Amino acid sequence: MLQALMSLIARCWKPFGLGDDANAGRECKDGLLWFRDIGRFAAGDFSMAVVQANQVLEDQSQIESGPFGTFVGVYDGHGGPDCSRYVCDNLFRNLQAILAESQSVVTSEAIQQAFRRTEEGFTALVTELWNSRPQIATTGTCCLVGVICRQTLFLASLGDSRAVLGRRVGNTGGMAAIQLSTEHNANIEAVRQELKELHPDDPQIVVLRHGVWRVKGIIQFQIVIHNSRNSWAISDSNLNLIILVSRSIGDVYMKHAQFNREPINAKFRLPEPMNMPFLSANPTVISHPIQPNDSFLIFASDGLWEHLSNDQAVDIVHSSPRVGSAKKLIKAALQEAARKREMRYSDLYKIDKKVRRHFHDDITVIVLFLNHDLISRGAVLNSPLTVRCALDH
C-alpha cells in the first residue's frame, strides 16, 4: 500500500513536460508550475495551468460551474497579490448573489453590477486597513471573466488579459484565431485617445517613457541581472510599479485622492491634485452567441500574450492533444522568453521566483473545449465544480 502511494505521488510530481494521462485529471505541481491537465465542466472539457515568476504569485484564477452555467476568471494582479486574491474570493460570489436577488439568468448588466460590488468592496477593505496596511491601496488587478450561460458566452474585461476563440474554418481542417476581449492598455492608440478625452485638462494623463506608454507615467528603473555559476541574481534593482492599463479593480490610490497621500510610499504619490479618477473599474462586456464551429476558448493573463500571438496560441492548442494543452502553451511562452534572452529553456526553468520575474511574468492559462451537444441541452454537472490555482505563495 505504501509503495503504491509513493508511486502515485512520484507520478504527480513528474518534471514539467513529461505528462502522464493517469494523472491528467489531478491537480499537480512542479516547482513554480501548477497544472490540471484535463477536467470536465458543464459545457465540455478544460485544461488549466499557472507558472509563478514573482516572489509572491500575483495571478489568481478560477473555474466555477453551477446551476446558471460556467464562470471563468483570470486576475492578473500588480503591486502585490492582495487585490487579485480579493477579486478571486468575491467576484463570482457577488455575481451569484445578484442573480439570486433578481431571480434571473446571466446578463451583461448583472456582470457589470458584480464588478461594481467587487470594486466597492475592495475600496472598503482599503479604508478599513488604511492605518495598519496602507500599501494595499497601491495594489490592483486586471480582470478577465467569461460566463457560459445556455448558448451564450458573456465576456467581461478590465486591463490587458485576453480571451481568444479557436473557430473551425469550413471543412478545411484549419482553425481561425479570433480575439473576443477588449484590452485597456495605454500602448493601444484608442485607449490613449479615450484617456485624453476623459481628462482634457491633463496633458500628462499618458506619458511615453523608454518607448512604453504609461498612465500618469512615473517610474524609472535600473535592473542588472547576472549569472554566477549558473545562479541567476539581481543587483542594483530599483523596481517600481508602472501603470499600463486604464481600467482595473483596485489601484485606489489612482482613483481616490484620500488614498494618494502619506503613508503610502512616495513613489506612488502624485504631486498634482486628483480631481477625478485616473483609472476606471467599468468593464467592457460583450455577449457572443456560441456557434457550431466555435471549437475552444483560451483565457490567459498578459504574461502569455507577451510571448505568443493569438495565431500561435490557437495553432498550439489545435495541433495538440487536449490533455495538457494549457501547460503546453505556458511551455511555449517560456521557450520564447528564453530565446529572447539568448539562453536555454532548461536554464530559465531553473531560475527561482522573483529573479524569474525579469524574464517573464506570472502566466495563467485556461483552455475551454466546447461540447456543443452539452451546450444545446443546457447540461449541468451533477455536483458544482470549483477549481482555483493552488501554488504556494
Image (cartoon, helix red, strand yellow):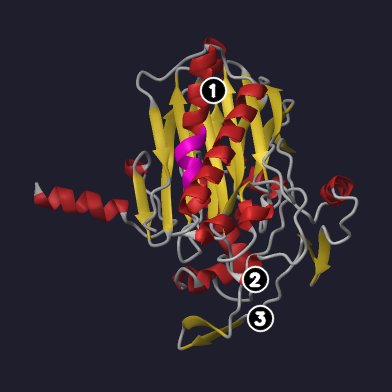
Q: Nearer the viewer, residue 15 or 209?
A: 209
Residue 231 counted in the magenta span:
no
The nearer-to-camera label among 1 and 2 is 2
The outermost residue toward the bottom is 228
Mark 3, other Cα within 10 Å: few <14 / some 14–19 / many ≥20? few
In the rendered image, which residue does mark 2 sit on?
A: 267
Residue at coordinates 42% horizontally, 61% vertically from top-left?
A: 32
Q: For the residue marked with disc 2, what is the amino acid?
A: Lys
Q: Which residues are magenta?
A: 85-91
Residue bearing the label numbered 3:
222
The residue located at (68%, 36%) in the rendering is 283
Kind of residue sitting beneath label 1: Asn
- Mark nearer the N terminus (2 vs 3): 3
For label 2, count other residues whose C-alpha is less than 10 Å away and answer few (under 14), some (14-19) or many (20+): few
Is residue 170 visible to the viewer in this orientation of the structure?
yes
SS of the residue at dot 2?
helix
The quarter of the displayed image where residue 265 is located: bottom right
- At x 55%, y 37%, the residue is 118
Give amino acid for label 3.
Gln
